[in-house]
Image (cartoon, helix red, strand yellow):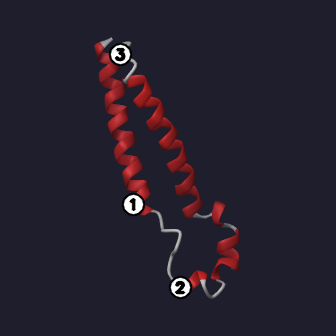
Amino acid sequence: MEALRMVINIIFIIVCIALTVLVLMQEGKHAGLGSISGAAESYWGKNKGRSMEGMLVKITKWLAVLFMGLAVILNLNVF
């Protein structure tokens, strides 16, 4: 059981690092003056879910769920 706990800890550390990197890679909600001039209504503004930024958001959400799940599992003291 101790080996399983060590494997889960290593996965948890990898998820933590990946989550930190992904959050730092994303743009802020207020990405400059382009939103004032109506650039949000462009093709990229309407199809943001299909862009690289949209993919980063989806991966971040899944990693956050995995992070919370692993944190709960590690704190159950079952191992």
Q: Residue at x 64, y 66 (%)?
A: 48
Q: Earlier in the sequence, mark 3 or mark 1?
A: 1
Which circle's residue, 1 or 2, is located before the other in the chain?
Answer: 1
Q: Amino acid at mark 2?
A: Leu
Measured as percent of width and height from the top left, residue 49 is found at 65, 60
Label 1 crowd (10 A; few <14 / some 14-19 / many >=20): few
> Label 2 vs label 3: CA separation?
50 Å
Residue, disc 3:
77
> Compared with residue 7, is residue 58 higher up or lower down, i.e. above or below?
below
Q: Quadrant of the C terminus?
A: top left
Q: Nearer the viewer, mark 3 or mark 1?
A: 3
In the rendered structure, the answer to whether residue 17 lies left or right of residue 25 reads: left
Q: Residue at x 57, y 84 (%)?
A: 34
Q: Which residue is mark 1?
A: 24
Binning the other alpha carbons within 10 Å of mark 2 as few (below 14), some (14 to 19) or many (20 upward) gives: few
Image mark for residue 33: 2
